[in-house]
Each structure stands twice: as structure tokens, then as C-alpha cells.
Image (spheres, helix red, strand yellow):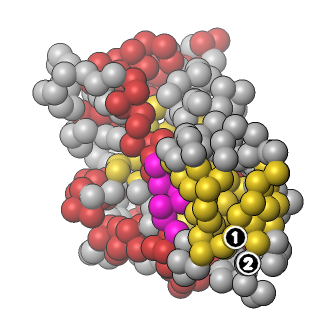
Amino acid sequence: MALKKETNAPHRTKGLVRATDDDECSESDRLLWLKDARFGVFFHWGTYAVHAHGSWAMHQEAIPAETYRQLAYRFKPRKGWADEWMDLVVGSGARYAVLTTKHHEGYCLFPTKTTDYNAAQTGPGRDLIREYVDACRRAKVKVGFYYSAPDWRFGLDPITPDSGDLYSRYKDSTRAQVEELCTNYGPIDLWWWDGEPPDVDETLRWMREAQPKMVINDRCGRELDCASCEKEIRPPADIKRPWECCTTSNEHWGYFGPGDIKWLRDVDAIHWLVTCASWEGNLLLNIGPKADGTLPAKAVSHFTRIGEWLEVNGESIYGTRRSSLSGGAGGATTARGEAAYLHILHYLAPEYVILSPRVRVLSARVLSTGQELNVRQEGERVIISGLPRRAPDRRDTVVVLKTDGCAEA
């Protein structure tokens, strides 16, 4: 069955429908939850899961647009997928989720008046974003929307104001979809841009009015609430600015079928998480679900093990800030008030040395076992001794350090 021709009829909200009746919150209030969360789960999901060659297959394999569009009728998620995802998000210890509302190929997981290339009018026959949002709220998980500004419905080449009528149609479609997402689902916690939309400044101004509490990332060509880096840990120059590293749990963003064989080990994911937290940033770790909404078994196992580690060691991650204490030869540190957390990522025993130039360390204990350790401080050198011969946790042994002043940098 062929899809109907694009209507390109922009939907315009009559007046401004605010997501909340509450007064606008301050910038610090709006950003606090993100700075405290530290860990989120990214979901790349769309019709590309049917093809199972990753989210860029249409471009990489030069699949004709009309051929690729037929995947939409084979994209049939089962009931209950969203709650299953949230069970994993909660079990992993993540505090927020981000879902691709529309990726580069232009398929919308939500009903839209701009195109019939959407979940309500193709295989699913329903609003998948509504199911996702409702499941997030039931699970008390913060709601994140990914939105791709590039849209291959209008061609693979960049679209500029010089593109004439094509640019006009692209601009109207983009703005209408942003309005639909910002007004039809209640308060949204995080908007995750991927690419600069047309008329970006006016669009951002409108979004701020429609969703005053929503955090907006900076991948739209503007320095906004949250800085972002991809597949590398790169804190912003202003380390106090909220930032996030997004990366994959395997080699692909979208589902890749049996070709997904190289998965990130839980020890590696924990090291990514700890390193981000030590620089006051977040880790957004991706899963590519299957076309029916089920999650790859390896992903479930992987995220579950991360959650088991956070169940024991979460106080060293959530709500922490950068520490004035160093991580020594094989570790990293986080801090909260007069407590510093030493993450020994590469275990050394029976002694471990760190530097504390600002505060004195009064005591130390292993977080997972409660074992008290010996501490002596010689100038800025802090020597922690009595560590067990074998690492209490081979992935990351966390030591809680009590200090005589604020341990935050």
C-alpha cells in the first residue's frame, strides 16, 4: 500500500497553549533535576527497526524514498512496550528517558497534520509518543523528546532559504511538528535537538513560552541549557554548565538485528558514567529497540547490571558535584557537601594515594561493605590504607571520605 502524497499543511496553534499553569521557574530550578540525575536512557526507534540495519540505512544504502516508506506498514509495536521500557529504565537506575519522536527519515511517532508518514496513519495505528509519555509518568521517569531538524522527506541535501518553496514547506512542517509536540503532551522535561531548525531563534522563543520548565539542549546551533557531546567525554569550558554525553551501548543507534555483536560491557558503562559525573555531567546511554517494541536481550542484561551497581553505589553519583579532591592514579572523585566519593576504577591495594589541597580527610570507608579504612594526610597527599587485597567491586570500588569542610570544587 502506497502512502498518500505529503500534504505539507502546517498546523498552527491558535494562541499559546502553555504546558503548565505554574509560574515560570528560575533557570537554576529548571536545570536542577538534570544536574542531579546523572544517568538517562536514550531510545532510537522508528521504521528503521524493521529494516534492522541501523537508523541511517536509508542514506547509507541509497534506498529509494518510496521503497523505504513502505517499512511504515510493517512497523507494528506490540501493546505494553512502553511500560516494559520504563521497567528497564527504573531498574537501570536511570532518572530520565529520551525517545526519537522523529529521526532523519522524517517518520513521526506521533499524529501530525503535516504528513501521513506517521504512526497513527501507518502500521502502529496509534500515537506512540502518547504511550511513551504516559508510561514515563507512571514510572516517575523524566520525559525527554528527541527531534531531528534534518528531514529526508524533503531530500538528502541541506535545505537553505535559497531552496525557495522547498524551504518554505520544510520550515512550516518543522514548526508545526514542534508545536504539536510542545502542546499535546503536557509538561515535557527535556527537548533534545539534533540539528538546527529553520527560523531557530523564533522557534526557541516560542518553545520557552509554551514549555517554560523544559530543558533544551544545544544541538541546534545555539548555546542553551545543556551542552552535549557524542561518543566522547568532552565537558564544556564552563564546567558548571549542565552537560551530557550520549553514546551507544553497542555499535549502532538503531536496531541492527543479529549484526549487533559488540556490546559495551557493564564495567565500561559504569566507567563512562563515573567519569561524566566526576566532571559534573550526565551519561545518556542508548538502546535500539526492535520493531515490535521488545528490547534486545543483551541490552536488558547490560542495563540491569548497571542498575545493580547503582543500587549499592548511587549516593556517589546522584546529586553529586565535582570534587576538589583528585582521583589519584586510577580513579575519579565526586562530592556532596562534606563527603567526597573516591571511585577506584583501576584497583590498587593495600594503599591508595590521592590529593586534597583544600580540605582535610577525616575518615574513609568502603561504600559497598562499610569497612573502615585508615587515613593519614601529609600536606595535600592523602594516604588511604587497609584496602582489602581483592577489590570489593572489580568495576568500581567506591570509598566514602569524610572531610572537614565542603569537598566540592
Amino acid marked by disc 1: Asn
Check contact, mark 1 vs mark 2: CB within 8 A: yes
- Image quadrant in which the N terminus is located: bottom left
Can residue 321 be seen here? The reply is no
Would you identify the image quadrant in which residue 322 lies?
Answer: top right
Whichever of callouts 1 and 2 sits on the residue coming sooner in the sequence is 1
Q: Which residue is tagged 2? A: 386
Disc 2 crowd, CA 10 A, few/some/many (<14, 14-19, 20+): some
Residue 229: image location, x then y, percent: 68, 42
Per the rendered image, the range of residues in magenta is 313-320
Q: Is residue 113 magenta?
A: no
Which residue is found at the position 33% from the left and 57% from the top?
141
Q: CA distance from mark 1 to mark 2?
A: 6 Å
Q: Residue furthest bottom?
A: 390
Would you identify the image quadrant in which residue 371 lies?
Answer: bottom right
Residue closer to the observer: 184 or 86 = 86
In the rendered view, tell whether residue 157 sits above or below residue 330. above
Residue 4: image location, x then y, percent: 37, 47
Mark 1 secondary-structure assignment: strand
Which residue is found at the position 48% from the left and 64% from the top?
314
Can residue 386 be seen here? The reply is yes
Amino acid marked by disc 2: Gly
Left or right of 41 on screen, residue 160: right
In the rendered view, tell whether residue 298 sits above or below residue 286. below
Would you identify the image quadrant in which residue 60 lies?
Answer: bottom right
Left or right of 320 on screen, residue 62: right
Q: Which residue is tagged 1? A: 374
Residue closer to the observer: 219 or 195 = 219
